[in-house]
Amino acid sequence: MLDNPEVPHQDETLPSADDGYQPSARRLERERLHRARTRRAIAVAAASTLVTVGVLYLAVTHAPGWPRTRETFLNAHYARIALPQVLKGLWLNVRLLVCCGALILVFGMLLALARTLRGPVFFPLRALATAYVDFFRGLPLIICLLGVVFGVPALRLQGVTNNPVVLGGAALVLTYSAYVAEVFRAGIETVHPSQRAAARSLGLTGAQAMRYVVLPQAVRRVVPPLLNDLVSLQKDTGLVSIAGAVDAVYAAQIITGESFNYTPYVVAGLVFVALTIPMTRFTDWVTARMNRRQSQGGAV
C-alpha cells in the first residue's frame, strides 16, 4: 500500500513542546529588561498624566469666575432636561450622515472620473468638473447652507421642496462632494500608468481598465482620508440647525433660549464627541492596518 503523502512518516522530526529547548541567560536577561522598561514607561506616563490633570483641575476650579461658569455651563439640572431632547434631535443628524454620505461618495466619484477623462472631446466636462470642485472647495460651508436654504425657496420653482432638512442636506452634498472628488482623484493618480497600459494590452477598453484595474486600487488607498471626511461630515450635520431643522444643536438652542443656561450646548457637544470618537479610532485603526500591510509588501 502506498504511503499517504498527507500523513507524515513516523521517523520525521516534528516540533514538540518537550524538545529540551532552554532560552539562554542572555535572552532571559534581555526579556527581563524589556519588561522592566515597559513597566517604567507605563508608570511615568500615568504619573505625568495625573500631574497634568491635577494642574488643569486646580487652574480651572480656582479661577475667579469658576462658580458662575459652573452654574452657567455645567448645571446638572439643565443637563438632565436637555439630554433626552438632544438625543432625539441627534437621530436627524445620524440620518443626514447616512443619506448625505452615500450621495457624496457617488457624486464625488463621478466628479473624479470626469476630471480624469482623456481626450479633447471631454474638455468641456473636465472644465466643468474642475470649476465645480474649485468653487465649492473655496466656498465656506455655512455660506453654501445659507444660499441653498434661503435662495432656493426664493426662486419659487415648481416641484422643488422647501424642506429645510432636504435643502440643508443638499448643501452638505454640494460642498463635501468637491472634497471627496479630490480624494478620489488623488487615489486614481497614485495608480501607476503601467497598470492601465497592462490592462489595455490584455484587451480591456479604457472604461474597463478604469473599472476593474485602476478604481479598486485607488479606492483602497484613499479609505483613511474618506473616513476622515465622514467624521467631519458628522460634525457639520449640526449646521442644518440654521435652517430651522430640529437636530441636536437646535434642540439645545431651544432649551437655552427658555432657560438662559448654556449647559444644553455642552450636552450637545459631548454627544457629538461621543459619536465621533469611535469613528475616529476606527479611522486610525484602518490607517495603521494599511500602513503595516504596505510596509510588509502586501496588497494595500
Image (cartoon, helix red, strand yellow):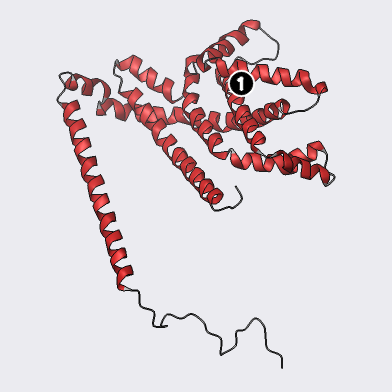
Residue 117 in the image, given as x and y percentages of width and height: 75, 28
Q: Is residue 222 above or below residue 242?
A: below
Q: Looking at this view, is 129 or 38 the one in front?
A: 38
Seen at 32% across and 27% down, the residue is: 81
Image quadrant holding the N terminus, namely bottom right
**54 shown above or below 71:** below
Residue at (54%, 53%) from the top-left corner? 296
Q: Which residue is mark 1?
A: 174
Q: Secondary structure at mark 1?
A: helix
Measuring 30% from the left and 72% from the top, which residue is drawn there?
Answer: 25
Residue 120 in the figure: left or right of residue 150:
right
**Numbered-mark total:** 1
Residue beneath the point at 54% across and 35% down: 225
| The one of 47 and 22 positioned closer to us in this rendering | 22
Q: Position of residue 171 (x, y in %)?
A: 58, 19
Pointer 1 local density, CA inside 10 Å: few below 14, some 14–19, many at least 20? many
- Left or right, 253 with reference to 163: left
Q: What is the quadrant of residue 45 in the picture? A: top left
Question: As shown in the figure, which amino acid type bears the numbered disc 1?
Answer: Leu
Q: Residue furthest right?
A: 203
